[in-house]
Amino acid sequence: MAKRSRRSSRKSNSWLKRNQTRLIIGGVIAALAVIVITVRQSSLGDIDLSIPDRSEAYTIISRAHIAAGETVEPGTYNSNPPTSGPHSSSVRAGIYQQAIPDENLIHNLEHGHVWLSYRDADDAEAIELLSAIQARFPRTIVVTYRPQNDTRVAAVTWGRLLKIDGELNEGEILAFIARYADKAPESVPG
């Protein structure tokens, strides 16, 4: 009996030594996941999800990648702004006062980002509000001027679109972000 116990103990110690690095790496990954989830939840904590969701779901038309600088034929996308479709390289999250090609921004959507766009370059209220929201989520939101919008402001995620005309409601945009950010095929949590 004593021999079995010693042999068993040696095997256990040997297994532990062989797998120590894997166990440590696994523990570090688990701890980082908990930190990311906690930080994300704390930044979403005060968002009122009782605000009705007026966004629309759109069929995912494509995840095809195209060459940088290549453009897509008019009528390819099934929404304005587009929520999916052929796309090229992404842009960094941030605030852009100029129009960025849809093909670039769709790639951001595929990675779980939120695209907030405004139609009128002189709409100081929209620019200020969207910029403040982007500052709250600096790693996952892109704000752009987009004169092709058919509404004052659009909030876009992969397969989802919220159009806002008239009065802007920060709570509605924040609820959209809480509901749909990081829910894409290649989401990279921010």
Image (cartoon, rainbow, N blue to C red):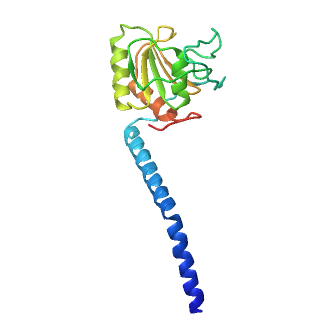
| Residue drawn at the location 34% of the way across and 28% of the way down | 135
The image quadrant where one finds the N terminus is bottom right
Please tell me whether residue 148 is drawn above or below residue 190 in the rendered image. Answer: above
Residue 106 point in image, percent of width and height: 55, 22
User: Which residue is found at the position 40% from the left and 35% from the top?
Assistant: 47
Is residue 107 at all visible to an observer of this figure? yes
Residue at 56 percent of width and 28 percent of height:
158
| Front-most of residues 155 and 113 | 113
- Nearer to the camera, 36 or 132: 36
Name the spot of residue 113 as percent of width and height, x first: 48, 29
Q: Is residue 8 above or below residue 39?
A: below
Q: Quadrant of residue 55?
A: top right
Q: Quadrant of the C terminus?
A: top left
Residue 174 is left or right of residue 9, and the answer is left
* Residue 129 relative to residue 49: left or right: left
Residue 51 visible in this rendered orientation of the protein: no
Q: Residue furthest bottom?
A: 1
Query: Count of labels shown?
Result: 0
Q: Position of residue 26 (x, y in %)?
A: 49, 56
Against 102, residue 175 (above or below) is below
Q: Is residue 65 above or below residue 13?
A: above
Residue 142 quadrant: top left
Give residue 91's position: percent from left, percent from top: 46, 23
